Image (cartoon, helix red, strand yellow):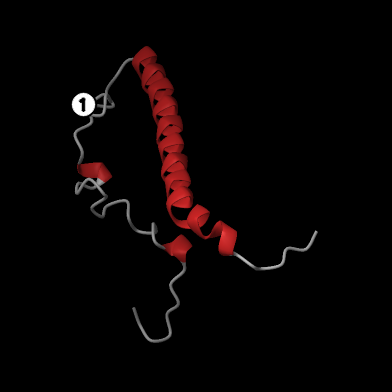
Amino acid sequence: MGVSTIEHMSDRGVGAVSAAQAGGTPWPARDPAALGLPASFDLPVVDHLDALADLAAGAGYLEWRRYRHAAALHTELVLPEEDRDERAVDA
């Protein structure tokens, strides 16, 4: 990072599509068959529709996992400090 660059938490995932993820393998390099995806896009229409349905379900599952990790972080980091938080909250 340069001296005049400010990093925001929301920037942490930018450019990470081809970067190694928590599993150590970038998403594009993962085996489609291991993820339950067709290895080719040369498919009949019905198989494209099936793949789209599977991808929608997979995206929902990944989003659920993301929220579970956020909840675990909240439980680990926020709840222990909750009783000592003396900041005033406007009603």
**Residue annotated with mark 1:** 33
Residue 56 at x, y = what percent? 44, 27
Q: Residue at x 57, y 64 (%)?
A: 84
Residue 55 at x, y = what percent? 39, 28
Q: Looking at the image, which residue sits at the far top?
A: 46
Q: Left or right? Give the position of 56 relative to 47.
A: right
Q: Left or right? Give the position of 53 relative to 83.
A: left
Q: Residue at x 43, y 85 (%)?
A: 4
What element does badge 1 sit on? loop
Q: Residue at x 47, y 61 (%)?
A: 10
Please state which of residues 84 and 51 is positioned toward the viewer in this rendering. 84
In the picture, residue 86 is in which quadrant?
bottom right
Q: Left or right? Give the position of 75 relative to 84.
A: left
Looking at the rendered image, the quarter that the N terminus falls into is bottom left
**What count of labels does the image hold?**
1
| 5 over 80 or under it: above or below | below
In the picture, residue 30 is in which quadrant?
top left
Q: Residue at x 28, y 26 (%)?
A: 37
Please state which of residues 8 and 82 is positioned toward the viewer in this rendering. 82
Q: Left or right? Give the position of 88 relative to 74.
A: right
Q: Looking at the image, which residue sits at the far bottom?
A: 3
Looking at the rendered image, the quarter that the C terminus falls into is bottom right
Amino acid under disc 1: Ala
Q: Looking at the image, which residue sits at the far front?
A: 83
Residue 39 at x, y = what percent? 22, 27
